[in-house]
Amino acid sequence: MSTENALKPIIVPIDLGDRAYDIEIAPDVLDRLGGILTEKFPGARFGVVTDLNVEKNQWARLQKSLEAHGLNYALISIPPGENAKSMARLDSVVFALLKEKLERNDIVLAFGGGVIGDLAGFAAAIMRRGMDFVQIPTSLLAQVDSSVGGKTGVNSPHGKNLIGAFHQPRFVAADLGVLETLSERHFRAGYAEVVKYGLIDDEEFFFWLEENQPEIFAGGPARAEAIARACRAKARVVVADEREMGQRALLNLGHTFGHALESATGYSDRLIHGEGVAIGMALAHRFSTKLGLSNAQDDARVVAHLKKAGLPTNLSDIPGDLPPTADLLDLIAQDKKVSRGALTFILTKGIGKAFIEKNVNPDQVFEFLNEERQK
Ligand SMILES: NC(=O)c1ccc[n+]([C@@H]2O[C@H](COP(=O)([O-])OP(=O)(O)OC[C@H]3O[C@@H](n4cnc5c(N)ncnc54)[C@H](O)[C@@H]3O)[C@@H](O)[C@H]2O)c1
Ligand SMILES: O=C(O)C(=O)C[C@@H](O)[C@H](O)[C@H](O)COP(=O)(O)O
Ligand SMILES: [Zn+2]
């Protein structure tokens, strides 16, 4: 594939019939958003949900664009971090939007990373029995993954993302410029989800990432191309299986382990989502090899690439103590892919050859995790 010009907007359509929408990836879409929203939603008011970091670094640009078109908005800004994906914070955001008298035909703008997208999207899904919303993803992770596909929700002490709804956005505005103020740690974490698309079913993309990772981190055309390729990959899966009745579960590669680790570390800065996914993908590869399904060479290649990008790949990379393995297994048993009590994992036959394995033996997971704890 030829390198895409970073200055030219890239449109990725999500063909979901009456819920179809576009992702626009461009360096200036935030500055043009006031005009886009005016055209798409004439007469609407906007409830902008963001966090304090995004407000400090990027709100001025969006505000200018909204005000240039005379749009009426209310700003709701919450403390940042994964802990915001809670029932308590959902309650306060919904309350604030209702207090602003947002009507059912008004629009929620989710302006932030994946935490804001999941939380504000869920708020939109339940407010007045369902309001429309627009995703304005400001982290790499949100641009390549969470703003696309309609999974919204919050966490529970019982497990990650256990309370939520499928609710598709009406538009996704992925502005490349906003990434300039994202921390390196969060950029790296988002990159784990980019690597995921290569590992699922596109070894050529994984090899391209091996070649281009430094350019992607530096910004410019390779970054725009990586984001667009990730969005197209996610679009293909979501259009084929919107509500995860089957193949969409492949997007969960690394997440069965990763989500349990995020819960076990209290949804804290000890382990952010993309880091959990990086460790989870390394574990999924090694577990597959232990079961005789994959091979050590591919495992090593995956780990080497994740490490080169500054990502963790071992349980011991997580600061502090982890709970006993039995507790980790309890968290894995709360995974939404569990069916009639049986564990489902996304396993692999090698790079780009992931598959869904139902009825995974919990004793084998327990033994594997105990071995991994020794590393
Ligand atoms: N719905 C989905 O399909 C889906 C997919 C993947 C991940 N997720 C969820 O996404 C969440 C993780 O998202 P995330 O990694 O974006 O985390 P995040 O939303 O916490 O954002 C990362 C951090 O960067 C800050 N930030 C974001 N954009 C910034 C910017 N442009 N400039 C400066 N600071 C900025 C935020 O304030 C936060 O501190 C997890 O809860 C995960 O479960 C959902
Ligand atoms: O969109 C999907 O489907 C995914 O699985 C994408 C994941 O990266 C994301 O973390 C998602 O929120 C996980 O979904 P869950 O259903 O396992 O909570
Ligand atoms: Zn994820």
Image (cartoon, rainbow, N blue to C red):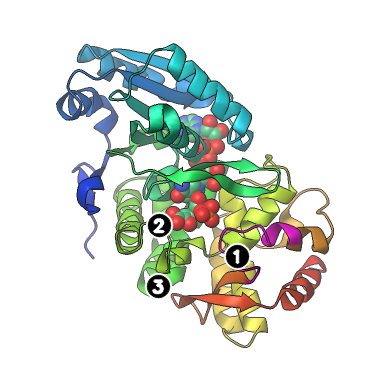
| Image height of 36 relative to 77, above or below | below
Residue at figure coordinates x 74%, y 63% from the top left: 329
The amino acid type found where label 3 is placed reads Asp
* Upstream in sequence: badge 3 or badge 2: 3
Residue at figure coordinates x 22%, y 13% from the top left: 68
Q: Quadrant of the C terminus?
A: bottom right
Q: Quadrant of the N terminus?
A: bottom left
The amino acid type found where label 2 is placed reads Arg
Dot 3 beta carbon under 8 Å from ligand 2: no
* Upstream in sequence: badge 3 or badge 1: 3
| Image height of 313 relative to 361, above or below | above
Residue at figure coordinates x 24%, y 20% from the top left: 44
Tag shown at residue 338:
1
- Residue placed furthest toward the bottom: 292
Question: How many residues crowd around disc 2 within 10 Å: few (fewer than 14), some, or many (20 or more)?
Answer: some
Label 1 SS: loop
Q: Quadrant of residue 248?
A: bottom left
The amino acid type found where label 1 is placed reads Val
> Disc 3 marks which residue?
201
Q: Nearer the viewer, residue 45 or 274?
A: 45
Q: CA distance from mark 1 to mark 2?
A: 15 Å
Tag shown at residue 243:
2
How many numbered markers are drawn?
3
Q: Which residues are magenta?
A: 330-342
